């Protein structure tokens, strides 16, 4: 089997954003297809994916650097012994002559490519990607059901608390039992009122997380920590800059509830530093790294190794992302659970068209690969891509 | 004054690499020109720059994200009170809607843009960029002479030590008094022989640095440290992964000579972490961050603040890069000195055509801006760009 084409197309989510308070008006994601010369059911076997949600398309890095390196490589050098593509070898070749450090856009670019390899291999095996991932990393089987939570809880004009409660109530009606809301976009007093309103819907602190999106300095983070502590929240997410390990460590010393961070760390070395210097607590705090932004599952497995070799459990990992790719990674690697952004970031966000959230859990589908074909609005975009 | 066009062109250095043992065969750099509606000497005032040397061109990030943001902005919002372009405001607008963390290719992209602003402002003032930089950051004046050292000391086939000695002797004949050589590409015993050969040319350990390019694990780094210590070297550079603060800290505890690192850290937050967790010693170790890869001079000034607020001196800063942009930043901000790669990375590397190294120092030229116009091979590339 050899790769014959690698296609990338930036997809603008512009018209699909349903909530104007998240400024993703010019947000883009790279759709990626790896086409091979292997014919399955009369068509060239093709792996498809995208580079998660929340950063940007990576057309330049993919077309100028990574795709040419892969197409110029001897196809034999990209294969595993069983004849499927090696995610590790594809990653090494795509990063050839790249210097160490600087884990940003490059990590998002390779992530999309590497995930397409998993989709391709799973389709060759005629199984869901979570099974291919589980077997590759020596796990008995993928789990079939994944804990999810609904991320949202936006600010509304006039700070009318009924709008916030209505939003979370919609998620509850969809089957979610745990919720995450924004904080830090208003005064502490206003945020406190919003949290108390949200708790009325969530039904208890352990069912509600708050997310500051990295905007607090250390003093503000500590001030919020003192105010949040009595609520016994599910977690307090990204209080400060994602690389500010000093702040995170001070917060972990001051705040007894779980902290969550990591969606803006894109390499195993950054995760190692978060663990060594950021004060994260085994069995307590939450790691949100997203393989779809971080060089793919190969590097994500290295992140888990950094965690587990230092006494942390993979159940503490709740990847950022809220899409099918992350769902399969969580199921394949046996992680704690998965974020979902109900209704926004379409057509990429969420799971298959007919996937239901039941009692805060989602069953992983049986479709081969990541099952992106079960999202009709998304698969139309891919159909154009490979046509 | 308003920006009318921002032009980017990737330049391949392929045919210009004179040393085949550095694998920069597909290396690219973004040439950037910011064109305004201000007419000076009958022509539109234009700032030019490039994103240093050693990583890659950033055509995608510039064209898809940063350039459109700048051209869509109200021109008034990009100006300082004196009517020149504000490097800080240009940076903020170019990064609009970018999330925190992930300081990689994006940092290289903005660096090229931001440096073009300095070139433009200096040309408007009819002065060298180092003067504009010095004044902007409240310094009395730029220094006129900068300490430089020659980086090279490559591996040669057959490990013939005469080739290494001949290379360093050429640099000495060009006026260099301090040198840097590669280590880690051979056994410790071979490297020891190479260092001893190089010392014969350098004339003493304080005139010779060694660079492992980040390839050692902690055990190997410590093994080298023990072997290197007796030579009393100028510094031991990038022993391990640039983000491995644990390794750097262990090395600082074990090795009494100066360590050098930072060319692969691209944000002030990463520098803060290096200082807090990497064991760097005030008045002793060397910081090599390169404004041309790290969001520009605006972010570089924040890095200096992280250093100086923790007892480090800006004289400990020796930026990576070895080109005119870095020379002016060093002169404008009063840093310790500057790297030079004699003869390679052309047409970008090195200083003006007629700049001479005298007794290990370089005089900063009088040409307006960064003086890229004084490098004839380079300015031909820019002439094509803006034509």
Image (tube, coloured by chain):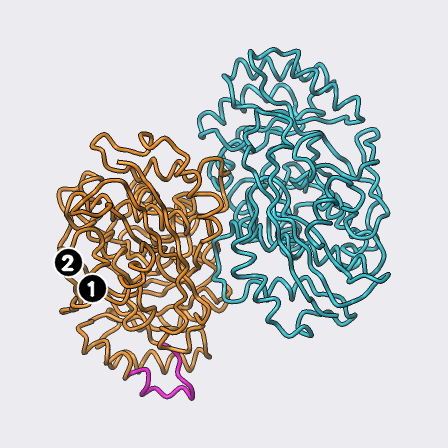
Chain colours: A cyan, B orange
**In this rendering, position of residue B120 left or right of residue B268:** left
Q: Position of residue B299 (x, y in %)?
A: 35, 43
Residue occupied by mark 2: B365
Look at the image and say whether residue B156 sits in the magenta stretch: yes
What span is in magenta?
B154-165
Chain designation of label 2: B
Q: Is residue A252 above or below residue A60?
A: above
For the question of whether residue B254 can be seen, the reply is no
Residue A177 lies, with reference to residue A385, above or below; the image says above
Q: How many marks?
A: 2
Q: Are marks 1 and 2 in contact (CB under 8 Å)?
A: yes
Residue at 84% from the left image edge and 30% from the top image edge:
A358
Describe the element under mark 1 as helix, strand or loop.
loop
The image quadrant where one finds the N terminus of chain B is top left
Query: Toward the viewer: B266 or B282?
Result: B266
Instruction: Give whichever of discs 1 and 2 has the lower sequence position.
Output: 1
Tell me residue A310's x, y (percent): 62, 50
Q: Quadrant of residue B374?
A: bottom left
Residue A94 is left or right of residue B189, and the answer is right
List x then y, in percent, for residue B146.
18, 59
Q: Which mark is residue B167?
A: none
Query: The numbered mark 1 sits on a residue in which chain?
Result: B
- Rendered image quadrant of residue A323: top right
Q: Main secondary structure of the magenta part?
A: helix
Q: Is residue B126 visible?
A: yes
Q: Residues within 10 Å of mark 1 (few under 14, many from 20)?
A: many
Q: Which residue is mark 1?
A: B352
Q: Is residue B72 magenta?
A: no
Q: Around disc 2, counting alpha carbons within 10 Å, would you say few (fewer than 14), some (14 to 19), or many (20 or more)?
A: many
Q: CA distance from mark 1 to mark 2?
A: 8 Å
Left or right side of B74 for A367: right
């Amino acid at each position: 089997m050899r790769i014959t084409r690698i296609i990338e197309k930036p997809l603008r989510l512009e018209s699909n954003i349903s909530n104007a308070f998240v400024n993703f008006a010019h947000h883009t994601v790279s759709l990626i297809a790896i086409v091979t010369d292997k014919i399955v059911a009369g068509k060239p076997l093709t792996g498809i994916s995208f580079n998660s949600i929340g950063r940007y398309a990576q057309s330049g890095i993919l077309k100028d650097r990574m795709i040419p390196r892969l197409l110029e490589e001897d196809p034999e050098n990209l294969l595993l012994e069983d004849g499927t593509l090696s995610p590790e070898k594809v990653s090494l070749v795509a990063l050839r002559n790249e210097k160490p450090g600087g884990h940003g856009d490059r990590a998002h670019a390779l992530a999309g490519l590497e995930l397409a390899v998993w989709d391709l291999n799973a389709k060759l095996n005629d199984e869901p990607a979570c099974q291919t991932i589980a077997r590759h990393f020596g796990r008995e089987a993928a789990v079939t059901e994944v804990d999810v939570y609904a991320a949202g809880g936006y600010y509304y004009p006039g700070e009318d608390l009924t709008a916030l409660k209505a939003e979370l109530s919609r998620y509850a009606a969809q089957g979610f039992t745990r919720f995450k809301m924004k904080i830090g976009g208003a005064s502490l007093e206003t945020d406190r009122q919003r949290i108390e309103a949200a708790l009325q819907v969530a039904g208890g602190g352990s069912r509600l997380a708050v997310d500051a999106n990295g905007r607090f300095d250390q003093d503000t983070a500590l001030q919020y920590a003192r105010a949040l502590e009595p609520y016994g929240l599910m977690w307090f997410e990204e209080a400060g800059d994602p690389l500010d390990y000093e702040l995170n460590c001070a917060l972990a010393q001051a705040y007894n509830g779980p902290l969550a961070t990591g969606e803006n760390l894109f390499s195993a070395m950054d995760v190692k530093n978060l663990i060594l210097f950021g004060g994260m607590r085994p069995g307590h705090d939450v790691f949100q790294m997203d393989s779809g932004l971080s060089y793919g599952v190969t590097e994500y497995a290295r992140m888990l190794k950094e965690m587990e070799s230092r006494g942390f459990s993979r159940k503490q990992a709740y990847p950022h992302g809220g899409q099918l790719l992350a769902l399969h990674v969580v199921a394949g690697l046996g992680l704690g659970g998965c974020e979902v952004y109900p209704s926004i970031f379409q057509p990429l966000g969420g799971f298959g068209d007919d996937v239901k959230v039941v009692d805060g859990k989602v069953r992983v589908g049986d479709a081969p690969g990541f099952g992106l074909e079960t999202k009709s609005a998304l698969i139309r975009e891919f159909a154009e891509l490979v046509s």
